[in-house]
Image: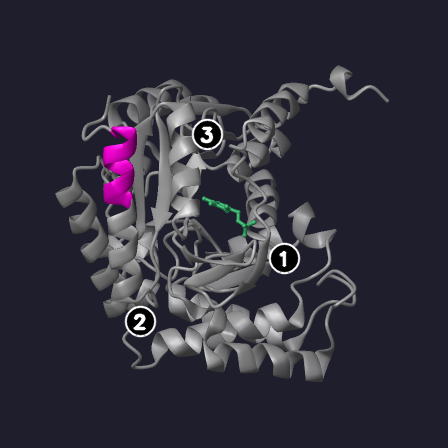
Amino acid sequence: MDIKTLRGYRTIQKANLLRANNLYPFFRSIENSEGTVVNVDGREQIMIGSNNYLGLTHHPHVVEAAKKAIDVFGTGCTGSRFLNGNLNIHEELEEKLAKYLGHEAALVFSTGMQTNLGSVSAVCGPKDCLIFDSENHASIIDASRLALGPTFKYKHNNMESLEEVLEENISRFKNVWIVADGVFSMTGELLKMPEVIALAKKYGAHVYIDDAHGIGVMGDRGRGTMNHFNCTDDVQLNMGTFSKSFASIGGVLSGSADLIDYVKHNARSFMFSASMAPSAVATVSACLDVIMSDEPIHENLWENVGFMREGFRDIGFYTYNSSTPIIPIFIGDEMKSLQVTNFLMENGIFATPVLPPAVPKGEALIRTSYMATHKKEELTKVLEVFADAKKKFDIPATFH
Ligand SMILES: Cc1ncc(COP(=O)(O)O)c(C=O)c1O
């Protein structure tokens, strides 16, 4: 077949152009990983491009738990929770997560993406609607395509815009869901959650939070953005992933027992897909044990984040309004962001560029993120290389 006839052909043209100029930054093949350091092309790179915020992928208790689960249950469940793939450890994990998050019940899915696809579409029928922050993650955008009710967007984190959209639509639909990221994944910015909840209450809407980057990190022992803002009881559905702080793969939805039971019997991505692998379930459970122990992982994480935020400010970078472990570095020009990424790589730093259309044209950035387990020497080296990059590429100190 002629791939030129396919809708996404332009992405391939762009990829080919970047490959020809040695600037293609994607699908770098990692040969091994120690968490904060990985090997690419036989060379060590300090990893500041992952979502392993708590650094738990290599924690001995976590690794041991994953291995033990394979011994007991084998490597996969070979079926949906609904039928043959429901293990006692799935149910134990759900109880543990509900308690941790402060909601009545929880349901685990095989990925975070599937959590959003199944849950959002299950709660939005033809007489309901979704109201979206304009910078929501792709998985909730795709979920809205599966939902039978319409979606309306409000301007990013803009409460006047949200109120306008609520006013226009609240009486036209049965259930109105405000859906937003708790932590915006590219800029690390927090949702104005207390204001969103106040508007939801004023208009009688429900709130669905995608807290993929907040769970494990924000709030008391990482209970999430809703806990950080003391809003847990006012969030009807909260979603999290295990592909970031929880060192594995999978997702969780939490809320009231009846809503969770409803989703369990209506979310197609849950019912018609094989369940989380035993080793993944055990990994998440072990991560929770470490989080609840007296290991100072959150203290270490915030110390590292503070060190880097200050370091980047001193060098003279614009780092948005991030108050999370995601620290974006504004570059602006797309080509320059690719050259800087290459320069970082050549100097032993693994970071990823964020390019249009993921950000508006002229707003390319390099997304950096930090782990509880980064060592000060590693972070100091990152700052030194970035300081060199600033001089070499004349990176702006302000936005635009
Ligand atoms: C905000 C947000 N939601 C959902 C997801 C999907 O999670 P997962 O990787 O577990 O499928 C991601 C992952 O990139 C994300 O950043």
The image's mark for residue 371 is none
At label 1, the amino acid type is Ser
**Label 2 SS:** helix
Spot occupied by residue 136 in the image (x, y as percentages of width and height): 43, 34
| Residue 135 picture quarter | top left
Q: Report the quarter where the N terminus lies.
A: top right
Residue sitting nearer the eye, 171 or 272: 272
Asked if ligand 1 lies within 8 A of label 2, the reply is: no
Q: CA distance from mark 1 to mark 3?
A: 25 Å
Q: Residues within 10 Å of mark 2 (few under 14, many from 20)?
A: many
Whichever of callouts 1 and 3 sits on the residue coming sooner in the sequence is 1
For the residues labelled 2 and 3, say whether their Cβ atoms are less than 8 Å apart: no
Residue 389: in magenta span: yes
**Label 3 SS:** loop
Start and end of the magenta stretch?
386-395
Q: Is residue 87 above or below residue 83?
A: below
* Residue receiving disc 3: 358
* Residue receiving disc 1: 110
* Residue receiving disc 2: 297
Q: Report the quarter where the C terminus lies.
A: top left
Front disc: 2 or 1: 2
At label 3, the amino acid type is Ala
Q: Is residue 29 visible?
A: yes
Q: What residue is drawn where x is 54% and y is 34%?
A: 24
Q: CA distance from mark 2 to mark 3?
A: 31 Å
Whichever of callouts 2 and 1 sits on the residue coming sooner in the sequence is 1
Q: Residues within 10 Å of mark 1 (few under 14, many from 20)?
A: many
